[in-house]
Amino acid sequence: MGVSLFHPVFIALAERTALLVVVAFLLTRVKAFRSILNQCASLKEQALMVLIFSMISILGTYMGIPYLDAIANSRVIGAVVAGLLAGPWVGGATGLIAGVHRYTLGGFTDLACAIATILEGVIAGLFYHFRRNKEIGWRTALLVGFVAEWLQMSIILLVAKPYEQALELVKVISIPMSLINALGIAVFMIIISLVKHEEERIGALQAQRTLQVADKTISLLRSGLNHVSSERVAREILRTTRVAAVAITDTNTVLAHVGAGISHHIAGQSIITKATREVLEKKEMLIAETKEEIGCHEPACPLRCAILVPLMRKREVVGVLKLYQDHSRKLSAVDMELVRGLGNLISTQLEIAELEKQSRLLHDAEIRALHAQINPHFLFNAINTIVSFIRFRPEQARELLINLGEYFRKNLHDSGGYVTLAEELQHVEAYLSIERARFDDRLRVEYDIEPEVDKYVVPGLILQPLVENAIKHGLLPRREGGVVSITARKKKQGTLELVVADNGVGMAEEPVTRPSAGRHEKRRLSGIGLSNVRGRLQSIYGPEYGIQIESEKGKGTVCTITLPLGVKPYAESVHRG
């Protein structure tokens, strides 16, 4: 005979499970617990998860209701949730600890319950592997909870002796435990899902703050790195972030320090911290986690930790950006990526400032085109993508940040210059790595590069605008996305043919197949960047060269660049100048 919803066992178990869920909710408010809710958790984080969820399972046992020399309990919640969050290893280890604890309490179901708890954690972990890289929703958690509880009932019937007593127990506790515990597991997973979404929202806010800083500081750094521009930039960063102090130095002097510690970290004095000198020497980001690592000799200094990133210009370090925290808050992984992004942004802005100083060496229209390459929408989307990856795929987020920095640095260095085709393709790949991360399987890229062709010299920044145009205007209007193909081959006429094709929406009008700027070419090549490519090619190689367009509505567009092998003498002189 089963048990009604108003049976004392049912009501008591529901009350205790609700209390356990409240405990779980309070746990999610603890920063240390939130930090381990990561599908790519390290071994240390997994061990911490085993410890936490084992305690939850043991608490579920102690809060159980004694009945027929057994315990109606919520022990399953800890083992199953651990498995659903981190896989069989964590689920099984949690189940093992909780199961051994249950075995030590005795009773005729002790062995059966111990075995069942281990298997419940492992089975939940197998669901995790089956749903790898996909968030496990409450419906799946509810199903796993039911499966786990009925598995436990089956094991009790098979292992516990005497069988008649085991059968009587299962009749009474099977329905309450399967319903209440499955619901408890589902609610637990809902709470954790809300926590993860909150972390993502915070990450998006950090990205927005980075863009706010970029927007406010672009004009400030046009004069380069000096006391006035550095102080205004530091104040803007301090205003938009949650740090205790911000400092900017050049290679010898503290240009600005705002926030805590201003009494002895004084703008204008020589660099005093050991950490800053180390960043200047090694040209690498440094995390100083203690006051001693910062290297400040002032005993009363309130600053306890810091993240320092080098500011680069032409691959040479020209200063350091430093974000400090005091004892009230620790540095997080999001803070680290935020500082890295700010360092790249400021370095890029310093590159722009340097280019503006040399503007007399380049044509004014070309400089405007160069600045137009830095698309704020692309930058915003790229940083948002990277921030969303930080929590669950930190290594990929790091690679994307490197690619983003290389992408903008390449834009700044190679306008009007010449590079090998291999270097040009590397720049394209840096751009594509960001777009692939944003659009996942909606964007596919195919390369067909003839051997040895990538050694030829071509004008810099001629392929990336075409690739961007193909993605933005050709593929993204299609819900399913599509393919961009990049082809390079040597032709018999002693020319180099570069082709960027997409299978996107194409153009409605008749395509223009000649290189001159026609009506349709203007439509496809709208924007300074692409028009600049055509103009540069014609200025270097003559009016007979440019971009040839072939397009058909619904089938895609093909953009072909044909270049003479090598660089003309007058083009070489422009490059040298």
Image (cartoon, rainbow, N blue to C red):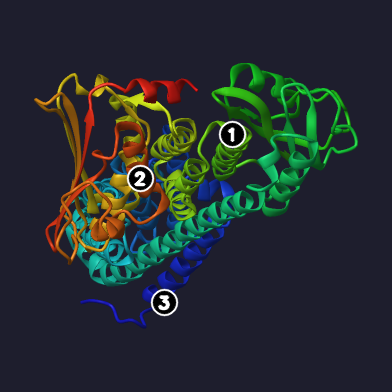
Q: Residue at x 30, y 81 (%)?
A: 4
Please give the residue where the numbered disc 2 appears in the rendered image. 86
Cα–Cα gap, marks 2 and 3: 31 Å
Q: Residues within 10 Å of mark 2 (few under 14, many from 20)?
A: many
Q: Is residue 251 above or below residue 203?
A: above
Which numbered disc flags the more N-terminal residue, 2 or 3?
A: 3
Q: CA distance from mark 1 to mark 3?
A: 82 Å
The three-letter amino acid code for the residue at tag 3 is Ile
Residue at 35% across, 20% down: 569
Instruction: Tell me, yes or no, if residue 80 can be seen here.
Output: yes
Residue 122 versus residue 286: which sits nearer the camera?
286
Q: Which residue is mark 1?
A: 360
Give the Cα distance between marks 2 and 1: 59 Å
Q: Quadrant of the N terminus?
A: bottom left
Q: Position of residue 136 (x, y in %)?
A: 31, 58
Residue 189 on image: x %, y %: 39, 61
Q: Secondary structure at mark 3?
A: helix
| Tag 1: amino acid | Arg
Residue identified by numbered label 3: 11
Position of residue 308 in the picture relative to residue 452 (left or right): right
* Residue 61 x %, y %: 43, 55
Q: Closer to the camera, 193 or 565?
A: 565
